Image (tube, helix red, strand yellow):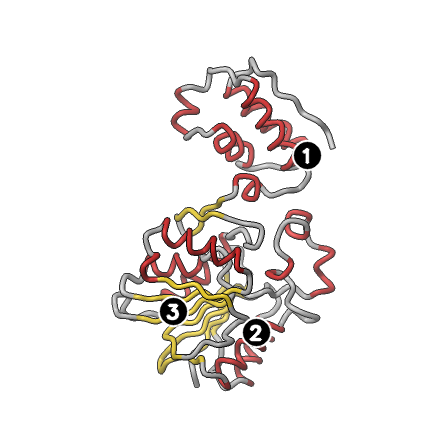
């Protein structure tokens, strides 16, 4: 891995240019350099514009060198800065949470579109909540809803609680450590989940940013990638946790899993699942209603 040094006398603007060029040389394009410089130097975009001619100094030069080395090694920029934006809201991250992806906003859009009246009281359940980004985004749009986020990882739940409080919905959210719906009882108007759906044999072939930095438990969906869907659908039909009359169940899915998840839903007693595609044209969400 190449070592890039930043001269402490270099201006902030020149450092951004050097960071951009160093990442581009490794095939890393986009806004990563700007994200890193702003976060590592503790600057806003306006401050960088107005005071871009100020020299780095030794401490900031060292911070940029360390951050650049981490990014070149394959660590995602979101992991380096420890936060990412989703649905226009800020979310802190930890090792046990996935980095929120723009594709997952499709799940939020589908869940919201299923609500004829966004102001009515709703009970929302988010299975495998991770950073809480899906639940928090929904609660930000459903002012009278109360949501529960479940996850097996305690650290993820602590992070989700922080994110809910930070985004002003903490009083309408609860976070529970559980294996899917185990120990949960009641009817919910909206159940959402972005479960692990990567087939186990495919994991070694994932990009290094995912394979080496995302939590395995949030990726591995079993031999065919469908274990979580089977478990959730079975529990919602046979267990004490269920959809309320007229409720909605919405899953994020892998690009090639739409037919399989639709079939599982039918076998579990749900009506035909409606598929929604993301902005790239890939099947991204399957939405069910009770039959």
Q: Residues within 10 Å of mark 2 (few under 14, many from 20)?
A: many
User: Regarding mark 2 in the picture, which secondary structure is present there?
Assistant: helix
Q: Measured from the top left, where is residue 122 in percent x and y? A: 32, 71
The percent position of residue 48, horizontal first and vertical second, equals 44, 24
Element under disc 1: loop
Q: Residue 164 is drawn in which quadrant? A: bottom left
The residue indicated by pointer 1 is 26
Q: Where 129 falls versus 187 (above or below)?
A: above
Is residue 110 or residue 9 the one in the foreground? 9
Of the residues under marks 1 and 2, which one precedes in the sequence? 1
Residue at 57 percent across and 74 percent down: it is 229
Q: Which residue is mark 3?
A: 124
Disc 3 or 2, which lies upstream in sequence?
A: 3
Q: Are marks 3 and 2 in contact (CB under 8 Å)?
A: no
- The residue sitting at 74% across, 33% down in the picture is 1
Q: Answer with left or right where residue 11 lies relative to residue 144.
A: right
User: How far apart are labels 1 and 3 at the CA level?
Assistant: 43 Å
Separation (CA) of disc 3 from disc 2: 18 Å
Write down the residue under mark 2: 229
Q: Which of label 3 and label 2 is nearer to you? A: 3
Q: In what element is the residue under mark 3?
A: strand
Q: Are marks 1 and 3 in contact (CB under 8 Å)?
A: no
């Amino acid at each position: 891995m190449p070592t890039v040094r930043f001269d402490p006398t270099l201006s902030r603007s020149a450092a951004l240019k050097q960071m951009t060029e160093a990442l581009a040389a490794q095939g890393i394009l986009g806004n990563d350099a700007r994200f890193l410089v702003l976060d590592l130097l503790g600057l806003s975009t306006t401050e960088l514009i107005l005071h871009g001619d100020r020299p780095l100094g030794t401490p900031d030069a060292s911070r940029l060198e360390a951050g650049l080395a981490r990014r070149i090694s394959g660590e995602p920029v979101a992991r380096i800065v420890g936060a990412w934006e989703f649905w226009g809201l800020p979310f802190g991250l930890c090792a046990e949470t996935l980095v929120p992806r723009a594709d997952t906003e499709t799940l939020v859009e589908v869940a919201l579109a299923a609500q004829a009246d966004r102001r009515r009281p709703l009970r929302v359940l988010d299975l495998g909540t991770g950073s809480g980004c899906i639940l928090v985004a929904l609660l930000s749009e459903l002012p009278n809803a109360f949501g529960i986020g479940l996850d097996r990882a305690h650290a993820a739940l602590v992070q989700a609680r922080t994110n809910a409080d930070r985004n002003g919905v903490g009083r309408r959210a609860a976070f529970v450590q559980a294996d899917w719906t185990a120990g949960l009882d009641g009817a919910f108007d909206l159940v959402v989940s972005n479960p692990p759906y990567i087939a186990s044999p495919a994991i070694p072939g994932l990009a290094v940013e995912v394979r080496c930095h995302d939590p395995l438990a949030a990726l591995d969906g079993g031999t065919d990638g469908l274990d979580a869907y089977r478990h959730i659908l079975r529990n919602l039909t046979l267990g004490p946790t269920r959809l309320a009359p007229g409720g909605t169940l919405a899953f994020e899915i892998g690009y090639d899993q739409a037919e399989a998840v639709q079939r599982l839903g039918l076998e579990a007693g749900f009506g035909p699942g409606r598929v929604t595609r993301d902005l790239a044209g890939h099947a991204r969400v399957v939405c069910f209603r009770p039959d």
